[in-house]
Image (spheres, helix red, strand yellow):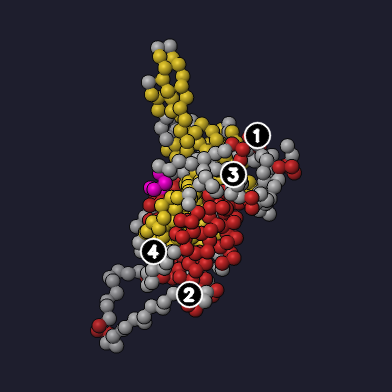
Amino acid sequence: MTLATARMQCGRWRFAFPLHWRRVAICLLCWKGIATAQNGSFSIQTNVVQVPVIVTERNGRCVDGLVARDFQVLDNGARQEVTVDDFSSGLAPISLAIAIQTSGISTPALTMIRHIGGMIQPLVIGLGGEAAVVTFDAKIKWVQDFTPDDDKIRDAVKTVKAAPGIDRARMLDAIVEVADRMQQRKGRKVLLLISESRDRGSETTFRQSMELVESRGIEVFGVHYSAYSTTLFAKPKDLPDAPPPPVVSPDPSDWPDSPPGVDILAILAEVGRLGKTNAIEALTRVTGGSDYMFLNERDIEDAIKKLGEEVHSQYILSFPQRENSTGIHEIDVLAPNHGDLVIRSRRTYWAGETTVEH
């Protein structure tokens, strides 16, 4: 098959969705092979690593029709023999967790976010999938647990409300809760973060959240916004309440003392570093997802459409985990005979132990 015949634009068939739902996969699936020994039978539990891969042309058009020989997969530098699953394989459905920031400053963005609930079931999870909705500000709240019910998903997204006066946004702590709740779920696991690009006040570190989504095989996608930019497109009634001005005593003796040993330059440097940190982008890169930005309602609707196109246009590459290779592994996915293509996939996976049962 030539590359010319393999190319197809993302989404060409999507509007027939949900009647046709495509590739879904699990990122770590255990299977048992039975072998017979001279003195009896025993079972060997072997981990199969599955890697969702998105292949596009440089203009963003998805490429369909590739086969196993078109790919080269390196596991810690060692080439692996892979199989490729596609739409016809009828793989496991999607579990999608939608985590939405609901800080007070998110008020303008939430007026746009509330309209996307009806897009989730037909465009993203399909008839066989389930979605859950969780919000985060200073608190983390599960608005709707995993359900296939389109009406419940719509209602959960439609009813999210901002927490007035709250500027915390515990994104990383919310990721931990999502990962814990997804741990026992079967099928493909996807997290959609709809929030600012950085965390505000989590106890969890970025590294901890990253390692957790990697170990649980969760793909992260982001639809992020600037809380300040969205106010430019908001109606006056949708603007967040302005905080009251601080009351400062005119007597300097009443002013609090600065903490001892404070290094102002170090503080400014840290603020600058945090300002450049984009937690969502980093998480999507390491797990093979995408990050989109929105300023208005049309932007976020386009982002959800694009998300649906991508999650249903992936190749699922599978290979058996090597023996005695537990721990974190680096994955490289290449298409050596198609140098003009752009390949996006998860960069790591966590290898479990292979066990023998007599």
The residue range painted magenta reads 179-183
* Magenta highlight: main SS: helix
Determine if the magenta segment contains residue 351: no
Instruction: Confirm or deny contact between disc 2 and disc 4 (CB under 8 A).
Output: no
Examine the rendered structure and indicate whether residue 250 appears above or below residue 37: below
Residue that label 4 marks: 137
From the viewer's perspective, is the residue at label 2 or at label 4 nearer?
2
Q: Please tell me whether mark 1 or mark 4 is closer to you in this view.
A: 4
Tell me the distance, in whole angstroms, between the alpha carbons under discs 1 and 4.
Answer: 47 Å
- Closest to the observer, 126 or 1: 126
Who's the residue at 41% across and 68% down the image?
A: 162
Q: Which mark is residue 238?
A: 2
Which label's residue is closer to the chain start, 4 or 3? 3
The secondary structure type at the circle numbered 2 is helix
Residue located 49% across and 33% down the image:
48
Please state if 339 lies on the left or on the right of 129 as rendered.
right
